[in-house]
Amino acid sequence: MNFFISDNHFNHANIIKYQNRPFKDALEMDRYMIKKWNSVVGINDTVYHMGDFGFKKNAGTFTKVLNGKIILIMGNHDKESQCHGHFHEIHKGLQIEIDGKTVNLKHYPYKPDVGKFDIKFLNRMLDDDGLWLLHGHVHNSAPKFVRKSINCSVELWDYTPIPETEIIKHMQEYPNGL
């Protein structure tokens, strides 16, 4: 099965304060996210991670204990040199098929879309091409669903990877988006 998630920020203590996460420290946060991840993802599953996986040079520490084959869509906190060798694949963006539909995977939402953005990220955002988009970056400053975009940021999904069946359910219920 395929899963989708974004913005774990493993080992990033300040993200607790920045995003008002309910943890006392990075260790508690990391343990909770690992537990939630491994409770739904099996060893033969694939997880598409829409960026900002970890903080500093720690990707390998976490990919070793997380179930599944992890495909990273790079975010603004991911450095390829620090991620190389720790993920099954690494991309800046990707298109995949979900339920017979082409879907964009990108760290950033469509431009101009929801949330607050620093102008420096506009050149990394896709123009809305009418396809579904799974993204992160905006954390909980934007809702789960906007038009044909699904915000996969961990804060919105109880820090748990989203099963493809949940994505399909939403796409079928709202074929033209919200």
Image (tube, rainbow, N blue to C red):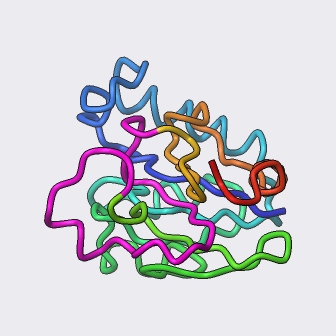
What residue sits 72% from the left and 57% below the top?
3
Q: Residue furthest left?
A: 119
Position of 177 with respect to 170 (left or right) is: left
Rendered location of residue 67, percent (x, y): 71, 56
Q: Which span is picked out in magenta?
A: 113-142
Residue 123 part of the magenta-drawn span: yes
Q: Please, is residue 103 above or below residue 12 in the view?
A: below
Q: Position of residue 26 (x, y in %)?
A: 36, 32
Front-most of residues 31 and 145: 145
Is residue 153 rendered to the left or right of residue 45?
left
In which quadrant will I find the N terminus?
Answer: bottom right
What residue appears at the point 30 percent right and 80 percent down from the top-left corner? 81
Q: Residue at x 76, y 59 (%)?
A: 175
List x then y, in percent, for residue 96. 68, 79
The answer to whether 105 appears left or right of 20 in the picture is right
In-front residue for pair 114/134: 114
Residue 70's spot in the image, x, y percent?
62, 68
The residue at the point 30 percent across, 74 percent down is: 124
Q: Is residue 118 magenta?
A: yes
Residue 43 versus residue 116 in the image, above or below: below
State left or right for residue 143 relative to residue 137.
Answer: right
* Residue 78 occupies quadrant: bottom left
